[in-house]
Every structure is written in structure tokens, then in C-alpha cells.
Image (cartoon, grey):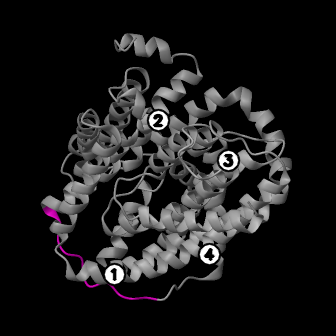
């Protein structure tokens, strides 16, 4: 197949990813798992190169456009859970479109930065990997500790007694710690004794992610939701300095998450935001959009770097089981697909946002939530069968803790951090045995 044809396949994958991004609870990794499964059975009319570029397009389209359910339905994925509260503030001010455009602009900015960095990625990352690889265990321990310690007490300042203020503060902090530990225990169960059938192992985390991140927000809308105010059709309006700063901060966090195992783009953006003292809401949303794309697209692009071939992230692991890129030609095709796919994806986002804005002011919020929740359950059933529904229900109960208490949904990422960090330091099997999982 010609190079132009391969890029065309990548752009077609971008459009497919943009459409799939509108389905709440459907993660791009699950769709990719089906594609890889069909590829290993020779059931796809695509060779390894074409499949790889189609997956790149799929990732780019999905990561740019899935901001729509995150903003308008409060149904984020694991890497964008952190944007829900600031984006909801925009939505309730009638500026949901502006919030989505800010996140989308950060996403496209990240793709531009990735394309500009592409000639020197090998020189940047090869020595960095040599330095960090022996210290990965304690780095993950430090990140987990920071995630817990960065919680901030939100007790009532006007409580009558110091004891009352202490209890109110620790009610919030305790809820965050409980969410982190419970999600971590669920991660141990799924890692060591998963109830998901072996033939659906590539979707092992799907019901947990749907329960942790999509179901709680949709339940909140279904039970207590009110129709948001009429949304404005707005132009994208942000200062160039804010756009550049937010993009660079997000790219730093996203690549940090993509380069290190287990760390998601949301956690990377949180760390980068603290390091650069972010405080502006617009800056925050731009950086989160940039971090998410740098995490998903950047970690996959690392697999294509000649001489590095770094396998990071679920998409790269799945693709490497079918095809391992080799040489500069496929690398530059991947870079071109990322850059051009970003343009197509942002155009799709802009068009789809107009429809989302019009629907948000004309439809019943609770009806939309009920339909979206039904879709999330159907996605879980389709990919994992009946055994995935109890996992989703348990994860949903854990995910409700931050919503009911007002905590950070980022704590739900304990499902990855707790078991993988303990495995890196060699304590995972002992903890799994103590929990009766071995």
C-alpha cells in the first residue's frame, strides 16, 4: 500500500474514533482490543502497517472528541476525570462549548508539540530511560504518596469548635483515602483473580473504569440533575500566552505519564500543574486536554521511534502483539498521521459541539442520563458479558464516594497505582496472598 493510502487509513480511523468518543463508558482501548483480536485471526483486510496507522488515527480522534461526554454528561475516562468539576462550572454558566474548545485546543496543541519533538524524541528519551529505569519502584511510591497528601481539607471554617472542624476536615480527607484504598483492592482482584472471562481479557479493566468514572456522574444526573442553562454558541477565546503555557504544561505531564508505567495523563497533568503553579481555570482545562492527548498519542508514538521502541500504555502493548514498527519510514508516517489526524479531529469536535450545545438546551437532562447510563451498561455487557456487571456495580459504589463527599475523582486511579506500585517494589504477591487472591 502506498504511503498516501496509509495516511488515508489513519484519517479514516480518526473519524471513526471521533464518533466512538461520543459513547459514554466506551474506551478506545476496548475498541482497539477488538481490532487486534480480529487482526490476529486474519479477519481484517489490513496488513500490520495499515492496522498500526488506523489505531493511531483511532486514538487521536477519540482523545480529542471524548471531551463532549466528559463536559456535557460528566462521564470522563481515567485520564480526564480531573476536568469534570472545572468544566461543570463552565457548563452551569452556559459556557460548556467554551470549556470543550479549551480542552480541544490543548489537545491539538499537544499534537503540534509532539510533531515538533518527533525528530529528537530518541535523543531525549533514551538517556532518560537509562536514568529512571532502576528507580521506578520508589518513583511510583512517591507519586502515590503525593496523590494522597495533595488532598486538601474542606471542612467548614465557621464550625463552632476545633474538634468539629477537625472531624469535618478528616471526613473529606478520609473519603479520599478510602476511595484510593478500595479502588486499589479492586485493582488487586482484577489483576490476580479477575472474574472476566479469559477470551475477554483485553477488556479486563473496562467494567471497573465504567463504574469508577462514568456511572457515578450519570447516576448523579439521573437522580439529582437539573437542566443546565442555555448554552452559548461561542468562539474560541483565549490569550496566546495562556494557550502556549497550558499546552506545554499538559504535554510535560502527559509525556511523563506516557513514559512511566501505570501513571495516567491525568496524574501527570496534576503533577505538572503543581510544579508550574497553575491557578487559572482556562489554563487548567487547556493543560488537561494537552496532557490527555500527549499521554495516549505520545505513549503510542514511542513504539514507533526507531531504536527506542518503547512499549508504554495499553494501546502500544496491544499493537506490539500484532505488529512491531521498524524503520524511519513508518515512524514519519505515524508522525504525519498524528499531525493531520489532529486537524481532522478538532474539526469534528467543533461540528459535534454545535449539536451537543443545541441538544443540551432542548432535551431532558435525566432522560439523557438514563440513555447514557443504559449505553454504558450495554457496552459493559457487550465486551465482558454478565460477569462484568457486578464488577461495574462494585466500582460504581467506590466511584460514588468522591461525588457524595465532594472529593477528587482522581483517587479512583488507585485501581492502577496500588497494585502496580506494590508489584514494582516486590510486595504485590504478598499483599495478594494476604487478601486471599493467591
As drawn, the label of residue 60 is: none
Residue 255 visible to an observer of this rendering: no
- Tell me which segment is drawn in magenta: 224-234
Q: In which quarter of the image is residue 352?
A: bottom left
Front position in the image: 260 or 157? 260
Instruction: Tell me the mark number nearer the camera, choosing from 1 and 4.
Output: 4
Q: In which quarter of the image is residue 234?
A: bottom left
Question: What separation in Å lies between label 3 and label 1 (alpha carbons)?
Answer: 39 Å
Q: How crowded is mark 1: few (under 14 residues within 10 Å), some or many (20 or more)?
A: many
Q: How crowded is mark 4: few (under 14 residues within 10 Å), some or many (20 or more)?
A: some
Residue 22 visible to an observer of this rendering: yes
Residue carrying label 4: 343
Front position in the image: 341 or 64? 341
Badge 3 marks a residue whose secondary structure is: helix
Q: Of label 3 and label 1, which has the lower sequence position? A: 3
Badge 1 marks a residue whose secondary structure is: helix
Q: Of label 3 and label 2, which has the lower sequence position? A: 3
Residue carrying label 3: 48
Instruction: Tell me the mark number nearer the camera, choosing from 3 and 2.
Output: 3
Instruction: Tell me the mark number nearer the camera, choosing from 2 and 4.
Output: 4
As drawn, the label of residue 357 is: 1
Question: What separation in Å lies between label 1 and label 4 (alpha carbons)?
Answer: 21 Å
Would you say 80 lies left or right of 165 here? right
How many numbered marks are there? 4
Report the residue at 37% width, 75% height from top.
90
Amino acid at each position: 500500500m502506498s504511503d498516501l493510502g496509509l495516511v488515508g487509513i489513519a484519517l479514516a480511523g480518526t473519524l471513526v474514533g471521533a464518533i466512538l468518543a461520543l459513547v459514554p463508558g466506551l474506551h478506545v482501548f476496548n475498541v482497539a482490543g477488538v481490532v487486534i483480536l480480529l487482526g490476529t485471526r486474519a479477519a481484517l483486510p489490513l496488513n500490520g502497517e495499515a492496522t498500526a496507522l488506523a489505531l493511531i488515527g483511532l486514538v487521536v480522534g477519540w482523545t480529542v472528541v471524548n471531551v463532549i461526554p466528559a463536559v456535557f454528561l460528566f462521564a470522563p475516562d481515567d485520564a480526564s476525570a480531573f476536568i469534570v468539576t472545572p468544566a461543570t462550572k463552565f457548563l452551569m454558566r452556559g459556557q460548556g462549548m467554551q470549556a470543550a474548545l479549551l480542552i480541544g485546543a490543548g489537545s491539538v496543541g499537544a499534537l503540534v508539540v509532539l510533531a515538533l519533538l518527533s525528530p529528537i524524541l530518541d535523543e531525549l528519551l533514551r538517556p532518560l530511560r537509562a536514568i529512571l529505569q532502576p528507580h521506578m519502584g520508589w518513583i511510583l511510591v512517591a507519586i502515590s504518596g503525593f496523590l494522597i497528601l495533595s488532598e486538601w481539607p474542606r471542612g467548614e471554617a465557621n464550625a463552632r469548635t476545633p474538634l468539629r472542624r477537625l472531624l469535618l476536615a478528616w471526613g473529606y480527607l478520609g473519603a479520599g483515602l478510602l476511595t484510593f484504598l478500595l479502588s486499589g483492592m479492586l485493582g488487586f482482584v482484577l489483576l490476580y483473580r479477575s472474574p472476566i472471562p479469559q477470551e475477554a481479557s483485553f477488556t479486563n479493566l473496562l467494567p471497573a473504569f465504567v463504574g469508577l468514572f462514568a456511572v457515578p456522574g450519570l447516576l448523579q444526573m439521573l437522580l439529582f440533575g437539573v437542566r443546565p442553562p442555555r448554552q452559548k454558541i461561542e468562539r474560541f477565546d483565549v490569550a496566546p500566552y495562556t494557550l502556549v503555557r497550558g499546552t506545554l504544561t499538559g504535554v510535560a505531564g502527559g509525556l511523563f505519564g506516557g513514559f512511566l508505567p501505570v501513571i495516567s495523563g491525568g496524574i501527570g497533568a496534576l503533577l505538572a500543574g503543581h510544579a508550574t503553579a497553575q491557578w487559572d481555570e482556562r489554563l487548567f482545562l487547556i493543560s488537561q486536554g494537552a496532557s490527555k492527548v500527549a499521554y495516549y498519542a505520545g505513549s503510542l508514538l514511542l513504539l514507533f521511534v526507531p531504536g527506542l521502541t518503547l512499549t508504554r500504555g495499553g494501546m502500544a502493548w496491544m499493537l506490539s502483539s500484532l505488529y512491531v514498527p521498524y524503520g524511519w519510514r513508518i515512524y514519519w508516517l505515524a508522525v504525519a498521521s498524528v499531525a493531520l489526524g489532529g486537524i481532522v479531529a478538532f474539526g469534528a469536535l467543533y461540528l459535534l459541539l454545535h449539536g451537543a450545545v443545541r441538544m443540551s438546551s432542548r432535551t431532558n437532562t435525566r432522560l439523557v442520563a438514563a440513555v447514557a447510563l443504559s449505553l454504558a451498561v450495554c457496552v459493559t455487557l457487550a465486551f465482558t458479558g454478565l460477569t462484568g456487571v457486578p464488577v461495574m456495580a462494585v466500582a460504581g459504589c467506590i466511584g460514588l464516594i468522591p461525588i457524595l463527599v465532594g472529593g477528587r475523582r482522581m483517587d479512583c486511579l488507585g485501581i492502577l497505582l496500588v497494585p502496580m506500585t506494590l508489584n514494582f517494589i516486590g510486595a504485590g504477591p504478598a499483599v495478594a496472598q494476604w487478601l486471599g487472591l493467591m
